[in-house]
Image: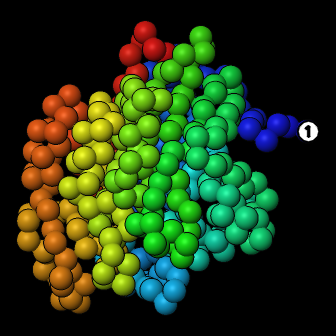
Amino acid sequence: MEPVNELTLPGTDVTAADRAQGSILFVGTATVILRYAGFTILTDPNFLHRGDHVHLGHGMTATRRTDPALELEALPPVDFVVLSHMHEDHFDREVERKLDRGLPIVTTPHAAADLTAKGFRAARALKTWETLTVTKGGVRIRITSMPGAHGPGFLAKVLPDVMGSLLEFENPRGGSAFRIYITGDTLLFDELKEIPRRFPDIDLALLHLGGTMFFGVVMVTMDPRQGVEVIRLVKPKTAIPIHYDDYSAFQWALGDTAQPPDDPHGWWRGTNVMSFEEFTAMAKYAAPGTEVHILRRGEAYTFEVPESRR
């Protein structure tokens, strides 16, 4: 029987060209498609449309303001899913209905148990700092669960456990070719300080922002200002904000200007909007060595891996 901390996928050996370049396609919310070294990885799949509602538990709902950049049916073949936690804006009812039940999903113990009960046969649970090694076509990727706090302490008992993720692609020599940190739906809190101590050289960080409010009162995901502090702490070479304006529960959104856009439905009412330019400037001041790259839905970021690290 295969060890719990390892997963082997079918695939052919990759070429040197496959290791030279990768990409991140932003679909919307926290959903991205990551391609590198023969892997295609999907994060937090959410494919609902503008006007659709999600249920977040305890009677809390949110309305989607945007459409995904592509439809669920248009997904390329995916090797596995990384899921930060079990909320419907990260794993929605259409995904639950249509996603292949045999697709590996790497997530929290709470979400893995929920998925297994729903018939997903390959859910893999990781506790904080635990690692799953995935091998495909001679390439190994180490997925380590990072600390996350989906709200202040008193809400921990009513909100689902959440994890960030550190995806580390290995080169043929066993070294690190490329490291990606995905924050998950977390607030800035003390345990995040351990991340740069354990992983001091992060190439790319995907930041879940939006300043989600629990019943409009308590913030349960980072707003852009906390996102800047995570950039200051982790100091990735590149930082990309995601999860920043897609739902009505997001009270601190990012946008092209510091003012809400035209909104005949009133979904932006009461929302604080920080401009992309202001966020980028704040991040540059906090971490001069980090480049902030803004992605709109449907846009892709291409990264290069130096030959010495391939």
Please say which color scheme the image uses: rainbow
Q: Is residue 134 visible?
A: yes
Q: Is residue 25 visible?
A: no
Q: Is residue 118 above or below residue 1?
A: below
At horizontal 71% and vertical 51% (from top left) the residue drawn is 124
Name the residue tied to disc 1.
Answer: 1
Q: Residue furthest front?
A: 154
Within 10 Å of disc 1 (Cα), the crowding (few <14, some 14-19, many 20+) is few
At horizontal 8% and vertical 63% (from top left) the residue drawn is 257
Element marked by disc 1: loop
At horizontal 15% and vertical 51% (from top left) the residue drawn is 279
Which percent across, then down, holds residue 191? 44, 46
Which percent across, then down, holds residue 108? 62, 56
Q: Amino acid at mark 1?
A: Met
User: The N terminus lies in which quarter of the figure?
Assistant: top right
User: Between 165 and 90, which is closer to the camera in this rendering?
Assistant: 165
Q: Is residue 226 above or below residue 288?
A: below
